[in-house]
Image (spheres, rainbow, N blue to C red):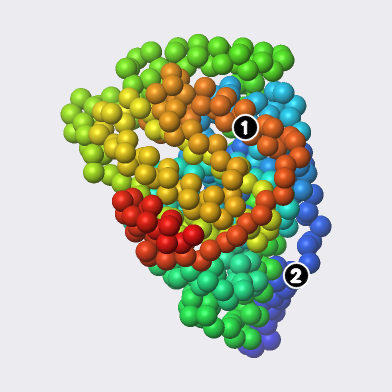
Amino acid sequence: MTKRLIRIFGPLILAAILVFAVLAMPMKLGFSHVSAERERQAAVSLSPNVLRGKHIKQEALKDGYVPFFGSSEWSRIDPMHPSVLAKKYHRSYRPFLLGARGSQSLTQYFVMQNIQNELRNKKAVFVISPQWFVKDGTRKDAFGFYYSQLQTTEWLTHFRRDAIDRYAAKRLLQMPVAKSDHFIYAALQRVAAGKKLTDFQRFYLQTRKNMLTQEDQFFSGIDLPSQNLNRVNQQAKQLPTHYSYSALDSLGGRLGKAATNDNHFQISNKFYHQGLEKELKTGHLKNFQKHLSYTESPEFADFQLCLDQFARLNTNVLFIIPPVNARWQKYTGLSATMLKQFDQKIHYQLQSQGFNNIVDLSDKGNVPYFMTDTIHLGWRGWLAVDRRVNPFLSKQQPQPHYTMNDKFYSTTWQQLPPSQLAQYQQTNK
């Protein structure tokens, strides 16, 4: 009976052991090549698998793609979108879009963990959405959707036991998804407490990272969506053969006017009819943002994680602060004073630490056809971004000099009222 069971199940057990051994091996298995076409697809796919993964991002960034960190704005692909302009005018760079709806600073910090070599001494673009900085910060379900054990194990195998990593571990422990692996959860608890990992934890994390890395090489490119690449190619056909800002600005105005002619908010007709028209008829959106604030939020500390990671890697970053559609802002009662205060607070956090490349568009919300909907850049907005992004990425830039400060992780900074910002700046000179 025993011999019979061995004959039946022996091959299955052996196969399982071999599969585990192959996946746990630290070396690559010869699947490292990513075709140019697949890189083009991945760069604009906004696929959660690409955001969570490692292999395709690494290969594309090695081949000259530049990481563009952000969130849902990247899905607004019109003829002036950064990916379209880069393709049409054969720029020396191609954007690799990192982010989608619901991705915020904490997600982006972990995204950076397995592309560190590709960020070191390089350039990047980062869109700061004011809408991230609400009272409770990133939504736990949204963070969980983009959570990657691969990125987490990558980080845990090289963490430094400093304030940065302790804060990151504490934030991750606040997310329900951190409990998806008992051993990773236990390791996070030790990091949060400033303790070394045990020998077993280091062994487990290294083995788990190897397995996830091999899985990523096998599966990250399967069913990679191509619709966004098709959209980029189609939108590029609308552009003039040779780059001309005035011609593109005029074209952007015409396209924006035609695309927003069904409502007085200058919101794209498609978005207006699908997402707002019925809601507006009820009247409950009038002044519904009157008491909303972006000035007191844990997002300020999560954002500091990204800044510290850029500083560690000496990454030269261009930050973009988009506006809010001024017509929508007035209708919903969103405070213009509050938006200005947010702008001042985020500027201080950036510039006091040496991040001086800032494209601040926060006062452009009333420019016609600058926005495609309530909060996302459109035709003329993308063109304004391009006027700064193109020279930043195409030309040599001075090396940044960062002076990082752990005070930006404090609850005091996260919850600092706007009225106290000037005093805070004086005290912390």
Q: Amino acid at mark 1?
A: Arg
Instruction: Please state the horizontal and vertical placement of residue 100, each as a whole percent of the image.
Output: 50, 43
Q: Quadrant of the N terminus?
A: bottom right
Instruction: Please state the horizontal and vertical placement of residue 74, each as a whole percent of the image.
Output: 53, 36
Q: Amino acid at mark 2?
A: Pro
Where does label 1 land, which residue? 388
The one nearer the camera, 64 or 278, is 64
Can residue 254 be spotted in the picture?
A: yes
Residue 53 left/right relative to 267? right
Q: Residue at x 18, y 29 (%)?
A: 283
Q: Residue at x 49, y 53 (%)?
A: 349
Q: Secondary structure at mark 1?
A: helix
Crowd around label 2: few <14 · some 14–19 · many ≥20 (10 Å) = some
**Residue 273's image quarter?**
top left
Q: Which mark is residue 26?
A: 2
Q: Is residue 102 above or below residue 162?
A: above
Instruction: Please state the horizontal and vertical placement of residue 40, each as a whole percent of the image.
Output: 69, 37
Q: CA distance from mark 1 to mark 2?
A: 41 Å
Residue 347 left/right relative to 249? left
Instruction: Check contact, mark 1 vs mark 2: CB within 8 A.
Output: no
